Image (cartoon, helix red, strand yellow):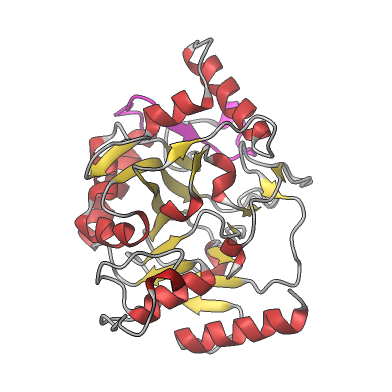
């Protein structure tokens, strides 16, 4: 895409969302259900017809690969998730399979159990309180628009982006989530990502490249950043620098749903606070596992399997085994995953 086409796309995108400044989207909710009578079902590749999304919302996701729903998750639920996260940080609860991660700049000698040293917890499928997020009816109502009625929660995270130490390690390189997933088809996978507080460019909001979900999965690897890179923060090595970038400014409870091929990342946290968000990747239970040997995903397979083998002492574990353990049915039936 040349610079003029990228600029034109961004202009249309911002006009659609009613934004005043280029490069920034303020979470905007389009309500109402539009009639799809004039649209042929084959024109929609990335959304499913279930009378939840309006015609405008479906067309927006089809074109851009993401959709923000404003004020979707309640303050009360977000507070409960925050409380449980703090309990995990204090080691009051230790759910099976949970990974507790800290920023690469925090040394072991500085590690004192508190939320100030934990940058992320992931795989919280065995934590009953945090996993409630993946079963919220208001979340699943929209997830079904992308996956269909048989829904698996596959990957869970609560991100606690720390204030940047000055080495810019709090940023996340541009990437596609499908790089981490050995299951397909990609159009039956969606991420729900909910802001747990006000999020903007100052504290490291999400940045997305609209329309990139229509492209292929790109090769990923660790970026060569001088200050260091956090574990498994793989990034795209070569992408179109002319593609429009849009920063998603969100309020507490706002939720963005996005396609696993959408190129996205986040900037460094320049504030003094910790920027929190909770997310889950959902997939149609009819999705199937693939063999990533000989593909660009071989590097992440090796890294994940090595970590699991060292952590749990398993010798013959495979990437499929890891994802089978992570996956939980949250609606309908468990079929393939």
Residue at left 52%, top 40%? 181
Q: Is residue 88 visible?
A: yes
- Residue at (35%, 65%) from the top-left corner? 252
Q: Which stretch appears magenta?
A: 90-110
For residue 305, side relative to residue 295 (left or right): left
Vertical order, 286 against 322 (above or below): below
- Front-most of 215 and 26? 215
Q: Residue at x 48, y 71 (%)?
A: 62
Which of the image's four quarters has the N terminus? bottom right
- Above or below for 203 versus 91: below
Nearer to the camera, 278 or 45: 45
Residue 63 image offset from top left, x and y in percent: 52, 74
Q: Position of residue 305 (x, y in %)?
A: 56, 23
* 294 or 307: nearer the viewer: 294
The spot of residue 336 in percent (x, y) is 36, 35
Q: Is residue 229 left or right of residue 117?
A: right
Work out whether 264 lies above or below 37: above
Residue 86, horizontal then vertical, whole percent: 34, 41
Residue 250 seen in the figure: no
Left or right: residue 319 compared with residue 169? left
Task: In this rendered view, identify the residue nearer to me: 112 or 184.
Answer: 184
Q: How many marks?
A: 0
Q: Main secondary structure of the magenta part?
A: loop
Quarter of image, res 4: bottom right
Which quadrant is the C terminus positioned in? top left
Q: Is residue 330 magenta?
A: no
Above or below residue 264? Residue 42 is below
* Residue 42 lies in quadrant: bottom left
């Amino acid at each position: 895409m040349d610079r003029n086409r990228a600029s034109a796309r961004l202009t249309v995108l911002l006009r659609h969302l009613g934004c005043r400044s280029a490069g920034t989207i303020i979470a905007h909710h389009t309500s109402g259900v539009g009639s799809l009578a004039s649209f042929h079902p084959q024109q929609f590749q990335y959304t499913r017809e279930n009378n939840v999304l309006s015609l405008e919302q479906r067309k927006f996701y089809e074109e851009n690969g993401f959709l923000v729903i404003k004020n979707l998750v309640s303050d009360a639920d977000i507070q409960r998730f925050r409380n449980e996260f703090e309990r995990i940080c204090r080691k009051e609860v230790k759910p099976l399979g949970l990974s507790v991660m800290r920023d690469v700049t925090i040394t072991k000698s500085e590690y004192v159990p508190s939320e100030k040293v934990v940058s992320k917890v992931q795989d919280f499928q065995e934590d009953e309180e945090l996993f409630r997020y993946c079963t919220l009816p208001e979340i699943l109502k929209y997830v079904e628009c992308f996956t269909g009625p048989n829904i698996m929660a596959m990957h869970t995270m609560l991100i606690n982006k720390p204030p940047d130490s000055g080495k810019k390690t709090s940023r996340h390189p541009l990437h596609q989530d499908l790089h981490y997933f050995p299951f397909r088809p990609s159009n039956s996978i969606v991420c729900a990502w909910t802001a747990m507080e006000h999020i903007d460019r100052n504290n490291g909001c999400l940045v997305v490249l609209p329309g990139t979900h229509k492209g292929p999965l790109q090769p990923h690897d660790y970026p060569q950043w001088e200050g260091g890179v956090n574990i498994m923060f793989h990034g795209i090595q070569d992408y179109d620098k002319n593609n429009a970038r849009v920063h998603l400014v969100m309020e507490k409870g706002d939720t963005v749903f996005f396609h696993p091929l959408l190129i996205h990342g986040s900037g460094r946290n320049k504030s003094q606070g910790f920027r929190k968000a909770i997310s889950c990747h959902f997939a149609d239970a009819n999705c199937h596992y693939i063999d990533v040997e000989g593909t660009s995903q071989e590097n992440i397979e090796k890294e994940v399997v090595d970590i699991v083998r060292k952590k749990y002492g398993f010798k013959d574990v495979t990437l499929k085994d890891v994802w089978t353990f992570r996956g939980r049915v949250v609606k309908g039936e468990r079929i393939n995953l």
